[in-house]
Amino acid sequence: MKIAAGAAVAMAVALPALPAAADTPDERPDVPVGTWLAARTQPAVQLTSFTYTGTVAVPTSTINQAAFNRLVEQATATVASGKISSDERSIAKWLFQQIAADVDTYLASTTPERTVEAEVGGLCTGWWVTPDGYMVTGAHCVQVGETELSQLFAQQALAKFNKQDAKEIISGLRGLEADEEIVKLAQQIYVTFNTNHMQLRNLKQSLSVVQSLPGGGVDKTAKPVPAELVSVGESYPGKDFALLKVNGQQNLPTVPLGDDSDVRTGDTLYISGFPGLVTNTPFFSLESKLEPALTEGPYNAKRTTQTGVPYIQTQAPSYHGNSGGPVFSKDGKVIGMLIAGTVSDNGEASESESFVLPVGIIKEKLGEKNIKPAQTTTTTRYNEALNDFFRRYYSDSLPKFREVQALFPNHPYVAKYISDAQQAISAGKDESPKPILLWVLIGVGVLVGVVIVAVLVKVLRGRGRRRRHSEPSFVQPPPGAVQPPSWRQLPAGQVPPPAQETYGQGAYGQGAYGQAAHGQAAYGQAAYGQGADGYGPVAYNAGGYGAAPHGSAPDHANPQYGSAPDHGNPQYGSAPDHGNPQYGSAPEHGNPQYGPAPDHGNPHYGPGPYGYPAPPHGQAHPHSGEQTRAVRYGQFTPPPNDRPS
C-alpha cells in the first residue's frame, strides 16, 4: 500500500503538463480579424451573373423631307439674324443639334428591318445560406426593369447600326469634312432614334453561379452553374432581396446569420464581394477575378427610406459588383447585405457611402419561403482546421482539411491549405501539441518504473533485515577499543532517553557519528549535511537530500520520503522506527551491522547504496516527527486516500 501510494505521487510529479483543451471553432486565433474572417467566409461567397438573350430589331431610318426643309429655312433665318455664323460647319452643327433634340420629327421609320442577336447581363455577389444550394443576393442582381433592359440592349446591340447611320447622314453634307464634334452629334441622333424604335424578341433570362470543378480551386475550371430564381423583392430603395436555388448541391460551405442587434453605430463592418473594377478588367487573371475582396469601415448610422425600409449606412468601401455581398460583424456573422452606394456625376462610386439591407429583412424573406439557414460538417471542420492552421498546428489541421475535401470536392481553397500545411511541416514549422495519449503513455511508463524500483528496494531491505536478526545484538569490542556507552547495552527495542549527552558531541557528534563516521567522510558535508548524521542544525541540507538536486516541500509530502507518519514507518522512521530492526535500537546500533564509527564508514552504509550519492527525492529532511509534520503538505490539503486526485 505504501509503495502504491508513493508510486502514484511520483507519477504526478513526473507527468508533464497536459496541453490545454482545444479552442472552440468560433474562437479566433491570434491573427487580425480581417484575415480570420476572410478565410472563413470566402468559400461561401460566390460570383453570380444574370444574362438576357434575345433578338434586337430596328427599322431603317429616313429623313422626313418636309420637316427637314422647314428646319433649313429656320437655319437661314438664324444666320441672317447673326445668331450663328454663316460658314457651313457652323450651320451643320446647328442642324444636327436640332434634329437630336427631336429625332422623331425629322426621322421616319422605313424598311428593311434590321436584326441582331444580342446578350446583356451583369455580375454581382451571392452567398450560400444552406448546404443544399440556397443562395442570397440582391433583387437588382437577378432582374432589370424594362426601361433599363432596353438601354442595356441598345448599348450592346445597336452600336454597329448607330455608326452606320451617322456616317450616311454626314455624307449628305455635300463635301463638308466632319470634325469630331459633328460625328458625335450625328451618332447621338441615331442612338436616340434606334433605341426608341428597337424591339426585343425571343427574350430569355438565365441566372448562374460561378463554381469551380473538383480539384480546380478558384481558377482554370470555374464555370457558370445554372440557378433558379425562387423569390425576389423590390429593387433599392425597396427590400432588395432575392433567393436563388442551385440544384444538385450538398455539403456546401455556408456563413451564419447574426441579428440586427449584433452591431450598432461605431462598430466595424466587413463587406465581402466581387468589385467590377476587377471582374471587368481584362489584365487580371481569372483566379484574381474569382477571389472575393474584403473591405471594412465603421457603421455610420441607421437610415429608413420613405417607404419604411431600414438600411445601414457604412463607410466600408463598395463598388459595382459588390451588390448582394454579405456584410459581417467582427464575430463572423452576417448582419446585412450590400445593396447600393452613392454614385458621382461621372458614374464613379463613392467609397464613403454604402447602404446595407439589415439581416432582419433577410431572415423575414427566408422565413416566407420556409428556408432555414444551416451549416454542415464542411463548414465546422473547415473553421476548426483554419484555427489550427493559424496557430501553426499544421499536423492537426491536415486531417480536418482532408475531411473537408472529401465532403466537398469542389471546395475552392482547401487544396491550397493542404499544400501550405504540408510545406510548413516539411520546413519544421509545425507547433502542434502532442496528443494526450502520448502524455498518458509517458506517465504510465514512469509509474511502472517507480513501482519496480520501489519493489526491488523493499525486497533488498527485507533480506538485510533477516540477516541482521540472525546476528548477535551485541559484540564485545576487542581489547583497547572504545567501550560503547551504557545505553547501547539496553535490551533490544528500547529507546534511550533523549539526553544531550546521548545525541550530542559524544554519541553522534565528533566521536561516534561525527567527523569520522557520518561527518566529513560518510554522512557529513558531502552526503547528508553539514551537521552530524542528519541530526545537526542543518541536517540533510548540503548533499544527498539537499535543495539543489531534488524537489521542494511537496516532495516531502509524498508518502515515500515525507511526513511524520512516513518517517514513522519501517522505511525511514521517526524515533520509534529508529528503534525497530531496520534502523535499529540502541543495541542494534552497537552490533557489527551498524557498529561504532568505523562500521558506519564501511561500504554498507558508506559510499555505496545508502551512502552518497543521495536518495532520489527530498529537500530539507528533518529527523524527528514534529519537524517532518511541519513540511508534510505545506498549504496543500492531503488527498482523501492513497490514490491521486
Image (cartoon, grey):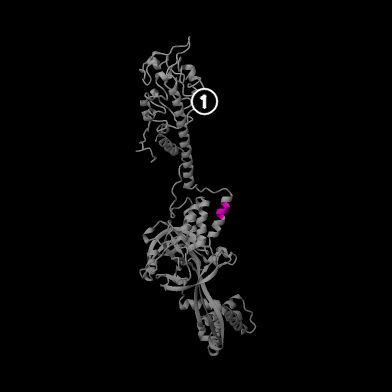
Which image quadrant: the N terminus?
Answer: top left
Where 491 sits versus 151, above or below?
A: above
Which image quadrant: the C terminus?
Answer: top left
Quarter holding residue 357: bottom left
Q: Position of residue 420 (x, y in %)?
A: 56, 55
Q: Is residue 87 visible?
A: no
Closer to the camera, 595 or 305? 595
Q: Residue at x 52, y 22 (%)?
A: 603
Verify whether residue 423 appears in magenta. yes
Q: Is residue 159 left or right of residue 625?
A: right
Closer to the camera, 313 or 256? 256
* Residues packed near mark 1 inside 10 Å, few (<14), some (14 to 19) or many (20 plus): few
Farthest residue, direction front: 470
Q: Amino acid at mark 1?
A: Gly
Quarter holding residue 636: top left
Verify whether residue 198 appears in magenta. no
Q: Position of residue 470 (x, y in %)?
A: 44, 23
Specify the segment rendered in magenta. Answer: 420-424
Q: Is residue 358 left or right of residue 172?
A: left
Q: Is residue 390 visible?
A: yes
Task: Tell me the residue that label 1 is attached to.
Answer: 608
Q: Position of residue 438 (x, y in %)?
A: 49, 46
Please give the count of numbered marks on the rendered protein.
1
